[in-house]
Amino acid sequence: MSVGADVPRIDGVDKLTGVARYVDDIELPGMLYGAAVRSPVARGRIRRIRFDEAFDFSDFVVLDARDLPGPNEIAMIENDWRALAEHEVRHVGEPILLLAHRDRRRLQAARRAVHVEIEPLPAVDDILAPLRPELIQYGSDNVFKRIEISKGDVAAAFGGAARVIEGTYHTGAQEHVYIEPQGVIASHEDGRLVVRGSLQCPYYVLSALTHLLGRTPDQVRVVQTVTGGGFGGKEDYPSLLAAHAALLAEKARAPVKMVYQRAEDMAVTTKRHPSIVRHRTAVAADGRLLALEIELLLDAGAYVTLSPVVLSRACIHAAGPYHCEHVRIYGEARLSNKPPFGAFRGFGAPQAFFALERHMDVIADELGIDPVELRRRNLLRAGQQMATGQVVRDEPDLVALLDKAVAESGYHEKRRAAEEFNRSHPYLRRGVGLACFQHGAGFTGAGESYLASEVAVAGLPEGAVEVRTAQTDMGQGAVTVLTQIVADRLGLPVEQVHMAVPDTARVPDSGPTVASRTVMIVGKLLERACDQLRARLPAGLPPAEAIRAWHAAHPGGELCGRARYEKPPEIEWDERTYRGDAYATYAWAVYVAEVEVDLRTYQPRVRDFVAVQDIGRVVNPTLARGQVQGGVVQAIGWALSEEVVWEAGAMLNCHLTDYIIPTAADVPPIRVIFAEHPTAYGPRGAKGLGELPHDGPAPAVLNAVCRAVGRRIDRIPLTPERLLEYIEDHGDG
Amino acid sequence: MDVTRPTSLDDALETLARRRAVPVAGATDLLVGWHEREHRPEPLLDLSALRAELGGWRLTPDRLELGALCTFWELRCAPQVAAEFPLLPLVAAQVGSVQIQTRGTWAGNVANGSPAADGVAVLMAYDAQVVLASSGGRRTVPLDEFYTGYRRSVRRDDELIVALHVPRRRHLREWFEKVGPRRAQAITKVGAALVQFEQGWRVVANSVAETVRRCRALEAALDAGRRFATPREVQALLAQDISPIDDVRSTARYRGTVLARIIYYWLAQ
Amino acid sequence: MAELVLEFTLNGQPTSCRVPGEARLLDVLRGPCRCTGVKEGCGEGECGACTVLLDGQPVNACLVPAFQVAGRSVETVEALRCDRDPDPELLNRSGVAQCGACTPGVVMMIRWLRRNPHLAAGADLRQLLAGNLCRCTGYDGIVSGAAAALKQAGGQHSDT
């Protein structure tokens, strides 16, 4: 039985011995390096591009928007994102010109020798500032997307409410800091454009290239190389990078590698959407939520990219795991003249939960109710509806999950001990905080139907199988867990299950590796493909033998089981009204953080962290635990130290020296507990996991800090400089 | 790349006598973002072959001598030094990371002249002296008289730091604290090194002025036996000697406030 | 110097290569020496992905000028192909590697710690490994892998 076993990571030893080849480790004969010349200003009209006379550009490939063979568009939800700016620029770092040369260092010198003269235009820096006509760059009001979710009668509920409690919460941008920067190599092989790169979604890149270059899919091949981290940052951006490399490769008639240095990567690639979320909540005296009114604003940056979907997930998750009859959620994704914000683990849910879970603690404080008790009174029970009207079929016991987290963390004991400690220590203050949250697995609503994912499992002559999906392993363990799922279903040892490299010439489009969909959606599809394969095998033989026997009887034949996504008939979603089953199912979690704040230096430190979640059946405990621990630490960084410092629309601190992610010394061991409540929708009952761990730590940590210092803090990152202001400038919260 | 690699100290000094060059020891500051720089310092004088003359450390009857190529790591591994100068290995363990400590040198930290230099703060609090050599001879400058401005010092272009001398004295109290954005790989936001000798106090702060510097007003108050009831009182004295700024890493308010608080609470122990 | 002929010992073997004068050790290793296991994560000495052992001590290869490497001894993650020290299967089971980008640097730190067990005994493992940034593991897998590797017998011991 492979599912549930700690199968060692299949690609692990290659990574540990330095054998695994990432894109920058690959060299092709005659290869050139490529780089972009970029806008120095946030918005303006391009007046002139001047090349230094003293610099010899004769052996460079130079390319601008006029060289584009097709539309100047990176295909995404809307096609407003341009491969190269032509007449105007909308953000600092927007690419204008591309250069290629054999010598990487000479290329860097060349970039400095190209001067773009831009007449500045008024730029949108603050999405809350009043919109003057000269700032409008999209539609009539710079709003990329609006979403409204309504349930019950919010107005009436507020009318009759005992108490109304308001709060506004802010979250900042966050940079992915995958340790391997973005990179691709474009070349021509066998009459086809081939792009190899560090990416999450080879078929997204394929779509972008066929659209940009006016090709058919069989004329382009996209291959994922070993990818050193993604977190969503390699979901959208690689389409643009691949476009650049491909354009240069076509013009140069030579392979072109484009790998970013860290500073460029941080400055110009996508980041998490900053958010402003306003809560207005009607509560009963005993803390029951009577009505939730939530306004959610996302700063989307200069182009639409994926913002409508980020907004969608944020809005759907905004009311959290609580029961409330009357809900109104209104969301907007607004343009600003910053590099476009994009996919990042959680995809809007972390922003929504920071606000919701901070607000729940504010409610608890105002009513004088214990924060745990407040959650207990409001958590969804079986049969109750979520904000979109969904009744969760899996019937998880959220109160039991809460109790487990409270018990494992020693929440109440810690709280009592903290209160006593705080009375006597000259400058250290401790506190405990929690957060309850969920993450829907897969694309929202009709999204999975739209993706129409396909997978294949091929039986090989030697008796092994090859699994063909476009799912990419970026460290989360996709190769290993999908191998386990297939091995289980077919009754084969894992050693006889091989994952094909995600290469669009060889694997079907099983959809992107995003949205926590790989295990649940694609894993389930693989089970069906396995069943189809088995149905073709001669009966009465063990699987490996049966496969060999089939091949012996059909020399040169193709033995393949396939499956295509079919929406479970009971899942119903109305995209127009935003009502129904937003996701087939959810993973649920309760996280508890204990912090200690040093009032001398205003530095909070997480002393202990307990992460309890129900992700259905755990496919691989070590890998699953690693996902939780990594996501928790990444979210702690978002909460306490990762600040993107903006100046005139540019990221000022685009170096690892000044963009502060946690080191091993900054975080405690993260204690992980899984409560397994299997779902019918996933393979062997497994649900999605990848993003859930980033949804809850920030409010849990902030709730603990607020408890420790007795202040109401509504904004992250909570740097020590800001905590100083909260403590010294505000009275007791 | 114009690099000269002398094989003796005399060679090195003769080179500097003839032309300006940037001395390179551990290179942990010089090489940061190396390929992205538009202009790189040149010519370079590579000191790494001079370990015989400039390496290591030794204890003489009245002082600890650190050779110019002595690294932070070497003092982390020196129990004899730890016994007498506990702040040295303590600060060494907080510079960057192990990978930086094995290469970074105390003399390089001094020569670089960053106002955030933790090594400099502790050496200054221990009353260290800088030994400068040129082809014309040697001279010794107290570290607290070495800096003349932001990243500027009395070192002439033809001089090399060849050693740092730290006097062996009785320390009544000593302490160093570094406040950074995280617990390793951090550029100091504000730091303090305090040593009480029989002869009096040294209070040194880093990241709060153009240079690492002594806070003489607070020293004088401590020498006079003053005690403090609140951090604000400490801050008022410090304000006479420091001028913290806002920058991408922190704020003037944070630096000034926190420097006073950490000192206050340590004194109050 | 426009170009440099660099002679040094790489993973126990005498090596000679031509490199540009301004090359960093990282460029030498990834380029002519074909040790692409050494990764570039930042070029600033912050992330530790390029950690190698120079005369037995861990350094960031992105901060070492090639001109200082002459006659010295460098070990990279490629050394594990011969001596499996630390044991990659043990590290794998502990969850040290996820995406693998920080992994070679971590492995070199663990190799160094195994040779200097007194260091790990006297200090906090998390503090010793704090120069290796990881975005995937949250560090628990790395720390437990390091602890397990330190308990395992065998491997080389040096007096460094």
Image: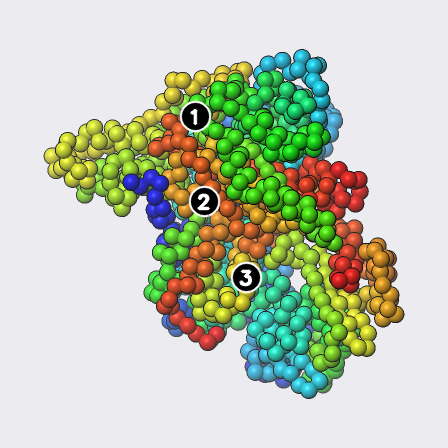
The reply to whether residue C128 is visible in this rendering is yes
Percent position of residue A422, x then y: 70, 48
Q: Which residue is mark 1?
A: A394
Amino acid type, callout 1: Asp
Q: Residues within 10 Å of mark 1 (few under 14, many from 20)?
A: some
Percent position of residue A420, x then y: 69, 47
Q: Secondary structure at mark 2?
A: helix
Q: CA distance from mark 1 to mark 3?
A: 44 Å
Closer to viewer: mark 2 or mark 1: 1
Q: Write down the chain letter for disc 3.
A: C
Compared to B102, does B51 lie above or below? below
Q: Secondary structure at mark 1?
A: loop
Judge by depth and name the residue closer to the eye, B68 or B32: B68
Percent position of residue A343, x then y: 53, 35
Amino acid type, callout 2: Arg
**Disc 3 with disc 2 on a shared chain:** no
Q: Residue furthest left?
A: A553
**Disc 1 with disc 3 on a shared chain:** no
Residue A568, picture quadrant: top left
Amino acid type, callout 3: Asp
Judge by depth and name the residue closer to the eye, A699 or A367: A367
Q: Write down the chain letter for disc 1.
A: A
Q: Which residue is mark 2?
A: A625
Q: Which residue is mark 3?
A: C124
CB contact under 8 Å: marks 1 and 3: no
Colouring method of the image: rainbow
